[in-house]
Amino acid sequence: MFKEILKDKFAGPALIILLVMYLCIACANFIAPYSKDFSDRAQAYAPPSPVYTVTAEGKLSLPYTYNYVRVFEPKLYQNVYKLDKSQKHYLRLFAKGEQYKILGVIPCSIHLFGTDKGGRFYLLGTDINGRDVFSRLLFGGRISLTIGFLALFILFPIGLLYGGISGYFGGWVDILMMRFAEAVMAIPSFYLLIILASILPSNMTSAQRFALIVVILALIGWAGFARVVRGMVLSIKNEEFVQAAETIGQSKLGIIIKHILPQTTSYVIIAMTLSVPSYILSESGLSFLGLGIQQPDASWGNMLKEAQEYINILYRPWLLTPGLLIFVAVLCFNLIGDTVRDILDPKGKLR
């Protein structure tokens, strides 16, 4: 399947992009020039730092940059940033910076890139609190890109087992279970999510809030999946291998788990790849509304919230970067999901 995905002209690049994204967030402490707690309020809304490779005399040089200095512009009646060209700050690979721990255990202070002592380099500018946007994108991606998979680990076991039991037993058991599932499906999920997120205690840590949002996302999304599984089980339970398992006296739950549910693997894989984008968007939407991950912790949703003001869109376009990453991630997952469906579905398009 992976070979087929890589051969596809759309899904192949999409898979590579996603792998790069997940590699970057996994190595965020090393790649990010600053820690997630770094803040320099004197550099609020500083634009991206320019990089120079040619000196004023026209000679080639190692890459360098200048620090920004904030000054008040009387004509514009606002603060503006100007480059302090009195001192160059050279960019360095494997630069020494703020300390972090590899795997939470091994202390280390080496970052992929940085500047010499006293320099400030903002690849994608800073936010209102003077925090490096590029570094926060990496740390925020850990939440935005993993929340979907964590929700699926809860949602899919519940949906598989619930749908399997309902379809296998049939009769009044099936009627009661499906009516309950339909009642859950009738609840407007996003509005329920907003209500539940808004009533969470304000003194909760972001980690606790993140865990609860994952659970909420899973508990409102299992019903539709269970209904589809139930339909598949209705057609599978009359197969000869199921009848043979019943003849030798295997338990009903064992038949469901060992013989019937494995037959739905193709659909499960397709559903997983197509479901992750919706959870990424749900988390981003909640955080954008201020009901998800709270500051100072970063997620792409609460970072994008700063860009809702038209002044920021016009004069600080680097704040829109989280929205671009959300778009790219969702598009990549959808492209891969469509390709996986075509590969695993024998009735799909001819390849």
Image: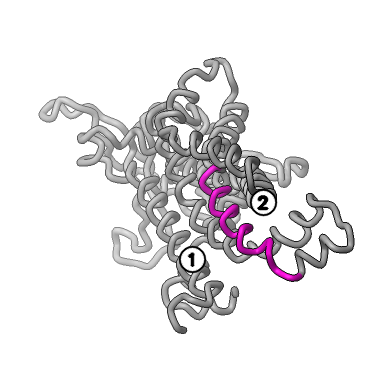
Identify the residue at image location x=52%, y=49%: 114
x then y, percent, for residue 173: 65, 41
| Badge 1 element | helix
The kind of residue tagged 1 is: Ile
Q: 125 above or below 9?
A: above
The one nearer the camera, 186 or 298, is: 186
Q: Are marks 2 and 1 in contact (CB under 8 Å)?
A: no
x then y, percent, for residue 245: 82, 63
Q: 325 above or below 7?
A: above
Identify the residue at image location x=57%, y=62%: 267
| Residue underneath mark 2 | 164
x then y, percent, for residue 282: 44, 40
Magenta span: 223-240
| Left or right: where 259 falls relative to 226 | right
| Badge 2 element | helix
The furthest residue to the bottom: 351
The furthest residue to the left: 75
The one nearer the camera, 14 or 166, is: 166
Tell me the quarter of the picture where residue 131 sits.
top left
| Residue underneath mark 1 | 336
